[in-house]
Image: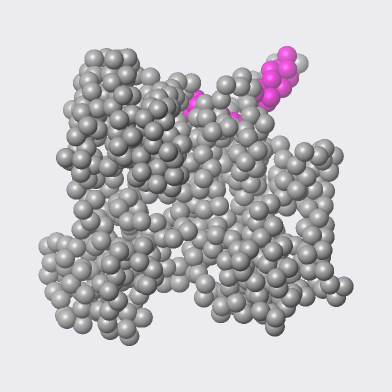
Amino acid sequence: MAINSVKDFGKAWWSEVYNRIIGAAVFLDDYSSECLHWDGGLLNLIYGGAVSVKSLSPFEFATKDQKKAVFITQSASTQLRTVREIIKHSDFAHCMLICTVSLDVIYLELNEGKDVSDMVATGKAPMEATKQLEGMLLEWIGKKQCAVEVVHLPLFTISPTNVVFLTPPYHKVYPAYDGKLTTESASIDLYTLNKEERAQVRRLASGLNSIMESMNLKEDVYYMGTFSSLIAGVLENSPVCLARRKNCTSPASLIVIDRTLDVCGVTSHSMESVLDKIMTVLPRFPGHSNDVAVDMSPLCEANVISHPEDLQLAPGCLYHANDDACTSTFDHMINKSQKEVMFHLYNKLSKIDVQRSPSPKMLLKVTPQSIEKIVAAAKGNYDIIEKHIGVLQQALGVVHTLKSPKRSQVELLQNLERQVLQSLAASRDSTSVLHQISHLIKTRKDRNLPLETLLALIVHVYSLTGTEVSFSKQHEDSLTETLSVAIFEDHKTLFADHGLRGSPEHCDDVSKSIMGRLKEIAMMRRNLQKYNSVLKPCETGGGHEYRGVLQQLVEDLVDTERPDLTDLRHRNEGLKELLRSGLNILTSKKTRSTKHPLDSPTVIIFVVGGITAEECKRINRTVITSGVDTAVFIGSTKFVTPVEAMRDVLAL
């Protein structure tokens, strides 16, 4: 298969898996399971010849007659211990370990604390890692007559559309330095990070390298943000990456960007993309970071009391890889308006409608109720449900979102954001925005606004203003005090996943920590020259609007005038400029012009820390309308909602 896109990349490597699983008991870690879901799911393994498929858990094992095992895993130390437990409680004669992470990275992790620089520099690390892992498997099986195999297959991407890709195993990677948003170190390298963060940077960089290798790309690496410079550094200097660039022939540009430069867009509830609305309202599909759980009870006879906690009915989801009609609908949820998505769904549902509802051409407007009516007509008709299960799940996801009580909260927050935007634009020096937010927090229960959505609003405000607005100390102190009280009152819901104690003193500390982080977020663009402001006058005249760093960069990127991309750094530019200036002394010839990302026919933009469907839509539209011939792919660690983005920023 010719790999021309990241979507092809994922499909090609999953095909390699399907070739290896015949007659095997297959064990997958959670991240590989999520990636499999976007390639077609469990049935791909079953139809491919697997005799059983189980989660990679120390409580799982194979039956006595199952002699072959295939483990698909990130191969971190805890996962390798789990593999050992499964092998010891089974009776395998043939074990294959599919490492989804590059073996040179695994080698560094297996030999943490040892001097292995010579092995890495000479490019022998992958081979040595293979030997070590095979030795472990042989020891765990404990039989003289057995076969073991270790292979690296880069299974870490999902592709919601032909131009967008995400990396579920790295959904927790966020631009941070030992848990802090800014680093105190003057010189930044991998050892500025803690051990876990360092491993994640290496793993993510190795994944991006795998994409380049599979697509035969020889890239120039550009970056915006300090954290992204570390990923760029690994890609530029790793022996595996250097060796790959010698063999690859197609020029490309890779642009890596820190999310923290602009968290304003991802904490905004003013979203047009239907997918963003759905992900904000519906709970996540269990164990997944990029799909939602859809309540299927309207189609079934089951009496579900509390979805998704009630486990008697499996939840539905939005993405169905093996149904072309569903993948086109998912694309619409990102790139089309709500009205277009509703008509698109109604058109598909009307073809299976047993009650003969009005045709789409007869309707001026499609409402959630009109879609719900067609879905309800299929209730209990399991022949219809089986044939059209994908579109029915997507339709229910849209209906539940648009009818959810949370929608009124979102609309209220949209109005509040608009008020804040105009208030900041009108009086940048004497703003009372924080005073207004303090009042909102105190009256949140009257307005039915959860504290976490208001925290997202505060993060939105600080990222929006950057260094352009100075809030008064009095207002900030008042907000800190108000937050402390609110956190004490709501700590059980705010910290439900952490089980933290809620003493007044602890809540006071959390409040002060939040304010410290907010001030850091406001300073994130201080070193940018061109993109240091996201608060811009409307092009149509009158008022101000948010125009994100990412959007401004892409607009300049595809501009035929080729404006200077002053904030986009090239990984090797410092050294190259030094060498050129030295040569100039000898030759006195004019230096060639600076490289531009669009000099390459392929550009990959990768955002570290999450992206919204709305941002993907706008970037894609900007590229298409510009008329450039360049293939532009948009990648990120995950799709993110305002509350999730807030939790990432504030480390809650």
In this view, the residue in front, 508 or 386, is: 508
Quarter of the N terminus within the rendering: bottom right
Q: Does the magenta stretch include residue 61?
A: no
Q: Give the range drawn in magenta.
A: 564-585
Q: Is residue 200 visible?
A: yes
Q: Could you tell me which residue is drawn at 26 percent across and 53 percent down? A: 337
Decide: is 335 above or below 652.
below
Q: Could you tell me which residue is drawn at 15 percent across and 76 percent down? A: 357
User: What is the quadrant of residue 178 in the picture?
Assistant: top right
Q: Decide if residue 84 is on the left or right side of residue 258.
A: right
How many marks can you see? 0
Q: Which residue lies furthest to the right in this view?
A: 144
Q: Position of residue 365 (x, y in %)?
A: 14, 61
Q: Where is residue 297 in the image (x, y as percent from the top left)?
A: 29, 71
In this view, the residue in front, 403 or 491, is: 491
Quarter of the C terminus within the rendering: top left
Decide: is 75 above or below 235.
below
Q: Decide if residue 641 is on the left or right side of residue 344.
A: right
Q: Where is residue 615 in the image (x, y as percent from the top left)?
A: 38, 44
Q: Position of residue 369 (x, y in %)?
A: 16, 65
Q: Is residue 576 magenta?
A: yes
Q: Could you tell me which residue is drawn at 54 percent across and 33 percent down? A: 179
User: What is the quadrant of residue 233 in the picture?
Assistant: top right
